[in-house]
Image: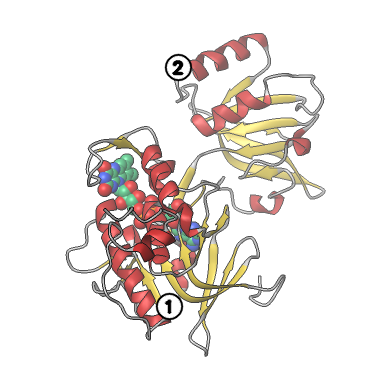
Amino acid sequence: MSLDDGAAPIETEALVVGAGPVGMFQVFQLGLQEIHAELVDALPHLGGQCAELYPDKPIYDIPGLPACTGAELVERLREQMAPMRPGLHLGQVVTRLQPRADGRFEVASSAGRRWLAGCVVIAGGVGAFEPRRLKLDGVEAHEGRQLHHALPPDEALAGRAVLVVGGEEPAIDTALRLSATPGAPGAPASVTLLHRRDALKADAQSLAEVARRRTDGRLQFIAGQPVGFHEAAGRLEQLVLVHGDTSTSPLAVDQVLVRLGLSPRLGAIADWGLALERKQLVVEPAGFETSQPGIHAVGDVNTYPGKKKLILCGFHEATLAAFAVAARLHPQRPQHLQYTTTSPRLQRLLGRAAPAAP
Ligand SMILES: Cc1cc2nc3c(=O)[nH]c(=O)nc-3n(C[C@H](O)[C@H](O)[C@H](O)COP(=O)(O)OP(=O)(O)OC[C@H]3O[C@@H](n4cnc5c(N)ncnc54)[C@H](O)[C@@H]3O)c2cc1C
């Protein structure tokens, strides 16, 4: 993708890469500085690790919140940043970031979206959450037609033999959804779940439902691991499976859905020419600027003396980074500290009426 393809770029004062807890709080802090932000994430939802890795687990070290789950924290951060009205761009990876002669940055995503940003704050955590892929050399040529790492629209699977690869929740949920009503308009012709061994991981209710459908024939199960594939006339015809006893067998395939979950990949961030130390962006601890003026990094993605990968520390970093971004974009504005408790200006920004005078 070239940076000058497609629609006109969105012009924005700030662009935040990563909508984990720290990226979300960054939007809020930029808003308090009266700086509009666009927020981008590879995931189709907000919340980063909190939402993806531990939505139901408790967090006990957020100041003032003795206990809350990952999902609750994300919901509170969403509510807190809402008055700042960020432009939200989910389900796309920021792939390119280039400084321009005028001091702004050209940014582009995997979805072809482009931005022109006065400042960029990278809150990329441990990397963009991307689907774990089927590791078979050359099989990617069938991506989008017969091989899918993201769920295709249901119409693409209607009347087809669907193989779902994976043994945990993402695969099991998909297999159960697709095999619910065989024969219904738009349903696949058959659904087969493929996992390396006959031991699946999901909640008890889902496992019981899988067992029921295996018995009534709505869902097939095969234990085996893909180690190769055969094609004919440009089509993916068979996967070669290895079984527990190291024997191999071919499996005829039509549509293959790989549902092996997500894993974070630092990916593009490492290619933007910014100073890195052990795969983390080196920043200075006053404004969390990287080696490129105008590009800041906050949260798990950065490193500096004494760095701790904690949400609380990311919130502090986002606050100071917002002051630094304001100083760069609006050097003429006075930068005195104001409290949300007492500042009518900040309360207006938050959409809260100033408290009535006593
Ligand atoms: C099981 C577990 C329990 C934890 N418990 C606690 C706890 O109790 N207390 C605590 O303080 N911390 C805890 N942590 C750590 C905490 O979750 C992290 O410190 C926090 O999530 C970091 O937030 P972040 O916003 O910097 O990054 P992340 O949460 O990792 O979010 C980064 C986001 O950036 C996106 N991204 C990255 N690169 C790109 C790109 N190029 N384009 C688009 N999007 C991109 C990713 O998809 C991701 O959504 C825990 C972590 C785990 C795994």
Which kind of residue does numbered mark 1 sit on? Gly
Q: Quadrant of residue 107?
A: bottom right
Residue in the picture at 66% in, 43% down: 229
The residue tagged 2 is 204
Which label number is shown at residue 273?
1
Q: Which image quarter: residue 8? A: bottom right
x and y percent of residue 321 in the render? 33, 70
Question: Does residue 35 sit above or below 19 in this rendering?
Answer: below
Residue 333 location (% of width, % of height): 37, 81
Relative placement, left or right, of 251 versus 345 is right
Looking at the rendered structure, the secondary structure element under dot 1 is loop
Task: Give above or below for 327 relative to 143.
Answer: below
Q: Can residue 310 be seen by looking at this rendering?
A: no
Density class for disc 2 (Cα within 10 Å; few <14, some 14-19, many ≥20) is few
For image coordinates 26% across by 35% down, the residue present is: 67
Of residues 277 and 153, the one nearer the viewer is 153
- Taking the image as shown, residue 324 lies to the left or right of residue 205, namely left
> Of the residues under marks 2 and 1, which one precedes in the sequence?
2
